[in-house]
Image (tube, coloured by chain):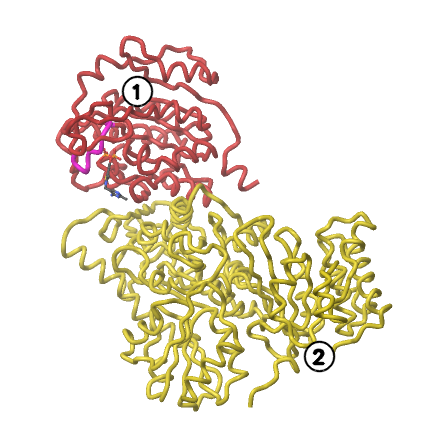
Chain colours: A yellow, B red
């Protein structure tokens, strides 16, 4: 019952040198298509270079949800010659290529499908910067997709609102008219739905979640793939009093945040896993001092500097076990921008509710890929946790309470002394080395776990989709969700899809309920050691029957993945 | 007033430790400011590093934040950003701020964060029982350098002036009155105030006799707005004498002012 993806999905590749504006073109196109009512997924790949390397944006759209882009291209927009060579194997049989020029051999090979589009020529003629070239291709694409340019002008104005709308629309018109004059074919039209949600990447959605939950200060030192959280929030400064600070290194990032939290502000920090590695001691301090801290950790291919702009899911264990010593923490691994938004909101709210550090585990794919999403702003309220009222000369920052959560006071409160320390301490925050006090404080902090586990019962700690009755189960976490859900369109027999969102504390009962007793369980993850499969075994005693592991730093391809899954289930 | 700043925690510094002199100077300094209505006790926050110096947070009855080793300065800036009304002082050690956390010291000076840092400078790691550090003299024989350290010491005051600190001073723990005044001047200064407090370790590197002879207070009027003179003064090598006093004191916009503009 294999579906033909190209009857419902249309895929466009845009390639060029770094600096050619490939990512911007992808974003403009995605925004345009979203505004027209399509479900869009945009992936970007680029090397760790500013100029010269090959950049590629790939966008799939459809009327129904697109969970992942496809590798089979219907259109290739080549902003340089290299792009044709690199991607010709990905072209579908009828795909067209838009380029400024073609090598004679390519003209022979592709015939009519090699379409000259006067991109460079038009920008030179109009004395516009070369980066605007892709607008000509965008216009040509509108013609091909039979999107009437006149009615689209308004959309184009929105898309280009920050970048010279008139010039870009003019260029789009040139591209559109060029194909029209040639009487070029229209491709089969995909009927749009109603425009909804927004076209957003995981990092931005996460940042919006933080903002909605009352973020005061964000601290970060740039590191791909976490940097766009920093860039987005920096651009939103001064709104609602938000401030963003880039300190001298990640150690300073987290220690500054802890100082600011102590003084009463809602703070978050973000980094890639390498930067988070530098934060370990202070992360443990947040646990010891019960300072509510939200942390975004975006995985990239490691170890060490690794492959900076490629993805990985190899830091699941690192995140769960972050920091020396034992203390409660929450680790959430969202799988799409909507879940990133939710995790952003929850990271601040739950950090303050329980006075613990909370990690949101992202990865390059989730952080940087963009899709049509509904961010649920309306559902968010701000939880400030347990706040000490009035003045209290006997205030003890670590006063023992049944639920392990002591009332919070901040320096500046009259007649109240707030003592916080990285040493083990008594209820007032004075250093202690007394064995019974040490034990009592460890137990005080872990008293929170019961309440966290109670709280998580009502949350989407796992998500089940596909065929809930199937004996065949696929489990996964993080961005692999997109690939698995998209792949499920091509399964020979439907399977139950179980996404694990909370990885610490682990939703033991829910997972047992959903995967216990399955005939086959395939765990799909982007690492070498099957960290999720091992975690499931550790927490539930359930051994998965099969694993699909990918550790070449590239995203899963949904069609390849479906083939692998079909093979296992058909065996 | 001073009594109000005390805690009942047992002091565990060595008997006769010069850190106690800094503790007394600080209680007097802020006690007077609070009494004189210049400072509200609840707005005072003392940060501490990790080392013998850091124990001070248990001995003062004010808001305290005992950070990780070397990281107090970042936390101080964070707190000042969060609430610019707070008066932030930090007690650090030479190991704490000249070794482990040197980058934060340099950057706090560079960004002119409006916080006050007092470095208990005993020219070695004391809490870890006596190893050489960034300011130990060359040839220093400690547990990790039994044949004498092979490195030249850092001049932290020179470093602070060049990094952009707007208040640079040195005092001697044994001179409680002098230290108190310098602390008050530092707190009164808007911007990054850095005070190196010579604090001989009586257990691992007792240099009290040496310093008693070597130190002298610079004479007023010293032009504290002249960077070149300040550099000359903190690099001066005349007869092995060590000048104390405020070498540099200028006004610049602070990091927190700029942030909240
Ligand atoms: C990350 C880290 N490294 C090492 C230590 C061990 N340690 C504790 S105090 C200290 C040096 C203290 O020297 P200094 O700052 O000069 O303080 P003093 O004890 O001399 O007052 C060291 C190395 C630590 N606590 N944390």
Q: Is residue A90 magenta?
A: no
Residue range (magenta): B122-129
Mark 2 on the same chain as mark 1 = no
- Which element is circle 1 on? helix
Q: Chain of mark 2?
A: A
- Which element is circle 2 on? loop
Q: Is residue A495 above or below residue A298?
A: below
Q: Is residue B125 above or below residue A556?
A: above
Counting other residues with Cα less than 10 Å from the Cα at mark 2, is it few (<14), some (14-19), or many (20 or more)?
A: some
Tell me if I can see residue A415 in this picture. yes
Asked whether, in this view, residue A402 is left or right of residue A53, the answer is left
Q: Is mark 1 within 8 Å of ligand 1?
A: no
- Tag shown at residue A190: 2
x, y percentage for residue A373?
A: 59, 70
Quadrant of ligand 1: it is top left
Towards the viewer: B45 or A84:
A84
Towards the viewer: B20 or A11:
A11
x, y percentage for residue A288?
A: 29, 54
User: Residue at image x 28%, y 48%?
Assistant: A422
Quarter containing the C terminus of chain A = bottom left
Tell me if I can see residue A198 in this picture. no
User: Residue at image x 28%, y 63%?
Assistant: A404
Residue A72 lies in quadrant: bottom right
The residue under label 1 is: B178
Q: Is residue A198 above or below residue A494?
A: above
Q: Main secondary structure of the magenta part?
A: loop
Asked whether, in this view, residue A513 is left or right of residue A541, the answer is right
Q: Chain of mark 1?
A: B
Residue B73 lies in quadrant: top left
x, y percentage for residue A75?
A: 68, 70
């Amino acid at each position: 019952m294999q579906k033909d993806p190209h009857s419902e999905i249309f895929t466009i590749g845009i390639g060029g040198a770094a600096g050619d504006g490939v990512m911007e073109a992808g974003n403009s196109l995605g925004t345009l298509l979203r505004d027209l009512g399509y479900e869009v997924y945009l992936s970007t790949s680029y090397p760790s270079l500013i100029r010269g390397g090959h950049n590629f944006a790939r966008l799939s759209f459809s009327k129904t949800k697109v969970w992942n882009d496809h590798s089979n291209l219907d259109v290739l927009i080549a902003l340089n010659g290299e792009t044709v060579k690199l991607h010709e194997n990905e072209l579908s049989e009828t795909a067209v290529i838009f380029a400024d020029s073609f090598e004679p051999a390519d003209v022979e090979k592709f015939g009519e499908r090699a379409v000259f589009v006067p991109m460079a020529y038009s920008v030179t003629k109009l004395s516009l910067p070369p980066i605007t070239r892709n607008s000509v291709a965008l216009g040509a694409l509108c013609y091909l997709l039979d999107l009437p340019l006149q009615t689209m002008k308004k959309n184009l104005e929105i898309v280009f609102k920050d970048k010279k709308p008139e010039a870009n629309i003019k260029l789009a018109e040139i591209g559109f008219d060029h194909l029209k004059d040639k009487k070029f074919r229209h491709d089969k039209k995909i009927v749009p739905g109603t425009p909804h949600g927004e076209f957003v990447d995981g990092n931005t959605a996460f940042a919006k979640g933080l903002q909605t939950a009352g973020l005061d200060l964000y601290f970060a030192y740039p590191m791909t793939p976490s940097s766009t959280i920093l860039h987005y929030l920096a651009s939103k400064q001064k709104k609602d009093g938000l401030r963003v600070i880039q300190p001298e290194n990640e150690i300073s990032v987290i220690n500054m945040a802890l100082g600011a939290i102590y003084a009463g502000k809602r703070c978050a920090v973000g980094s890639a896993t390498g930067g988070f590695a530098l934060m370990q001691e202070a992360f443990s301090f947040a646990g010891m001092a019960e300072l509510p801290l939200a942390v975004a950790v975006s995985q990239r291919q490691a170890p060490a500097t690794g492959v900076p702009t490629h993805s990985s899911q190899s830091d699941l264990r690192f995140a769960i076990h972050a920091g020396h010593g034992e203390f409660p923490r929450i680790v959430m691994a969202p799988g799409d921008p909507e879940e990133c938004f939710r995790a952003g909101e929850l990271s601040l709210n739950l950090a303050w509710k329980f006075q613990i550090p909370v990690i949101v585990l992202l990865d390059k794919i989730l952080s940087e890929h963009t899709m049509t999403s509904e961010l649920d702003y309306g559902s968010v309220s701000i939880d400030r946790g347990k706040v000490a009222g009035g003045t209290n000369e006997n205030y003890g920052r670590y006063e023992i309470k049944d639920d392990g959560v002591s009332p919070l006071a901040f320096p500046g409160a009259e007649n109240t002394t707030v003592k916080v320390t990285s040493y083990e301490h008594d209820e007032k925050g004075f250093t202690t080395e007394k064995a019974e006090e040490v034990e009592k404080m460890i137990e005080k902090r872990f008293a929170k776990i019961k309440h966290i586990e109670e709280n998580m019962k009502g949350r989407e700690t796992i998500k089940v989709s596909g065929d809930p009755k199937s004996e065949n189960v696929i489990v996964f976490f993080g961005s692999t969700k997109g690939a698995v859900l998209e792949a499920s369109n091509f399964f020979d027999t439907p399977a139950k899809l179980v996404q694990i969102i909370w990885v610490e504390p682990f939703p033991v009962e829910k997972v047992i309920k959903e995967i216990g007793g399955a005939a086959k369980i395939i765990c799909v993850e982007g690492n070498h050691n099957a960290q999720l499969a091992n975690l499931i075994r550790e927490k539930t005693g359930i051994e998965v029957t099969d694993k699909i592991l990918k550790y070449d730093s590239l995203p899963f391809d949904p069609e390849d993945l479906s083939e692998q899954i079909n093979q296992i289930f058909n065996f | 007033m001073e009594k109000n700043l005390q805690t009942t925690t047992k002091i565990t510094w060595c008997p006769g430790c010069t850190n106690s002199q800094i503790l007394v100077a600080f209680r007097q300094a802020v006690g007077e400011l609070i009494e004189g209505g210049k400072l509200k006790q609840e707005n005072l926050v003392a940060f501490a590093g990790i080392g013998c110096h850091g124990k001070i947070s248990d001995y003062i009855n004010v808001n305290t934040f005992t950070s990780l080793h070397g990281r107090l300065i970042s936390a101080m800036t964070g707190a000042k950003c969060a609430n610019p009304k707070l008066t932030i002082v930090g007690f650090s050690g030479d190991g704490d701020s000249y070794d482990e956390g040197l980058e934060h010291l340099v950057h706090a000076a560079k960004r002119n964060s409006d916080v006050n840092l007092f470095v208990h400078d005993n020219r070695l790691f004391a809490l870890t029982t006596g190893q050489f550090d960034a300011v130990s003299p060359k040839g220093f024989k400690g547990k990790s350098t039994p044949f004498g350290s092979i490195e030249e010491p850092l001049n932290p005051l020179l470093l602070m002036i060049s990094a952009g600190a707007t208040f640079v001073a040195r005092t001697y723990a044994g001179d409680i009155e002098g230290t108190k005044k310098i602390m008050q001047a530092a707190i009164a200064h808007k911007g990054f105030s850095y005070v190196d407090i010579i604090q001989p370790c009586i257990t691992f590197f007792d240099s009290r006799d040496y310093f008693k002879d070597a130190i002298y207070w610079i004479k007023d009027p010293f032009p504290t707005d002249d960077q070149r003179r300040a550099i000359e003064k903190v690099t001066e090598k005349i007869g092995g004498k060590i000048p104390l006093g405020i070498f540099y004191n200028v006004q610049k916009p602070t990091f927190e002012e700029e942030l909240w503009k």
